[in-house]
Amino acid sequence: MLETVQQLLRQRRNDDTPALASGERMWTWREHVAEAEAEAAALITLADPTRPLHVGAVLPNSPAMLRAMAAAALGGYVLCGINTTRRGAGLLADIRRSDCQLLLVDPEHRDLLDGLDLNGIQVLDVTGPRYAELVATAPPLVPHREVAGGDTLMMIFTSGTSGDPKVVRLAHAMAIMCGASLIFQYDVTPDDVCYLSMPLFHSNGVAAGWAVAIGSGATMVPARFSPSRFLDDLRRYRVTYLNYVGKPLALILSTPERPDDADNTLRVAFGNEATDRDIAEFARRFGCRVVDSFGSSEFAVIVVREDGTPPGSIGRPYPGVSIYNSTTLRECAVAEFDEHGALTNFDDAVGELVNTQGAGPFVGYYNDPAATAQRMRHGMYWSGDLAYRDADGWIYLAGRTADWMRVDGENLAAGPIERILERLPQVSQVAVYAVPDDRVGDQVMAALVLRDGARLEPDDFAKFLAAQPDLSPKAWPRYVRINDGLPTTATNKILKRALMAAGVSAEGGVLWTRPARGTAYRPAVETNAMS
């Protein structure tokens, strides 16, 4: 088996099957590899040979980004995927943290660098005449190094949902392994077309999208995620496979349904963090198979759905993955439920997902020993994700460690409350989080986005909560805000830090409150009715 992406792409030098489609243009693998080798040769001539060769890419999902990824693999240097939604000091911190010598940009993102102290980093516009000349006149490629499987292919930033993004090192062998696993599971071949609309600076876009395409020889279609353009793209390019992370399925399902939605070529949608309802509805509406799994950006904790996975569960864990109490350093108790399915031993059952066998493929965050030490404690990898498991070994997420809430002396987690609120047929997106109580502890707040054309009244919301037998009275949200959209990361994960920072506020939408001991919700802010 091949160990590096460098080896893999070299084998495609004479492959005349389709590799890449964008707009009206199509590239074969022969053409794609040749362009990538020319780019790699040009960049190597510009680099300081006495320093590690790290090339930053401030690029959207595009032929240029895919070429940059292939060039790094073939050239034996490291590509740093820079989050294109970051700005100012945050963007500069990412660039500096990853030790980039060179930065690749396009005209759309060039202005993001204005005013930043790049300290001598060379900035190259991949659409400009100077860059075209550099590539055209580059000598034959002599790789910066012949890489091994454990060498870093890319540096990928975490989503930043719970703090500043950290730099994860993705090894060549890990990219090969991720691609091979999904290729085998979903029978991806050179005849398939992979829709790459998740950011290619994130682990999901690389491991569940790009790695599948290059490993199978399928055609890559780079795209910017757009719910309104989604189905048109499927049909135009005859897409058969796509990957997702966060809320894309919910966003697509919020668009008006059409009778012919299932008239497309899509076979498989693979990703993370979709709800049970959205998985089933997406599969029905678009006539495809949807497979949802759970994995950390560091690839150290993986949980996979299997046939028979109960509602609400994310599946069964890989060997070594368990749930531990971070204080006692012991495995948490098996979850117990009442006759309505409500968790009855929260304090004993809920803990942090860990890899008891160590870090797995995670080799630490680049240039961040403190964050690495926080992840690797007591010889185990600590994911920062709360979960519990039932007697049959099925895992249920309870949120992030920051999602703990202390309400009236009782511990609560956001995840189970969110799953209950997701049962509301009017709701497209849900986030549950803590806001400070006036006296002590926390109060529960929920942020909702409604489906297109849906309406939700305070009385109907209260009746829904009262009808949920597995919802504790203390878990009823004290405050509810309804907005047209919620703040998200570049990978479509809801940014709870921003919601918590806003406090008890409508933020341009509708805000409901209920009395501390009451169940009736009333509008707290006069605003136009949401629909």
Image (tube, rainbow, N blue to C red):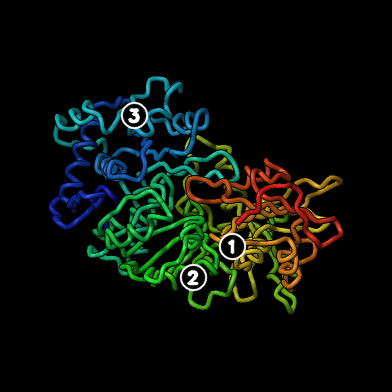
Tell me the tag on residue 102: 3
**How far across and how far down the image is residue 63, in percent?**
27, 44
Q: Position of 414 compared to 484: left or right?
A: right
Amino acid type of the residue that numbered disc 2 sits on in the rendered structure? Glu
Point 40% across, 28% down: residue: 111
Q: Are marks 3 and 1 in contact (CB under 8 Å)?
A: no
* Quadrant, the C terminus: bottom right
Q: Could you tell which of marks 3 and 1 lies nearer the N-terminus?
A: 3
Category of crowding for the residue at label 2, using alpha-carbon neighbours closer than 10 angstroms: few (below 14), some (14–19), many (at least 20): some
Amino acid type of the residue that numbered disc 1 sits on in the rendered structure? Ala
The vertical placement of 105 against 183, above or below, is above
Secondary structure of the residue carrying numbered label 1: loop
Of circles 1 and 2, the one toward us is 1
Residue 53 visible from this viewpoint: no
Q: Position of 243 compared to 451: left or right?
A: left
**How far across and how far down the image is residue 400, in percent?**
63, 53
Q: Could you tell which of marks 2 and 3 lies nearer the N-terminus?
A: 3
Point 25% across, 29% down: residue: 128
On the image, numbered disc 1 is attached to which residue?
A: 454
On the image, numbered disc 2 is attached to which residue?
A: 281
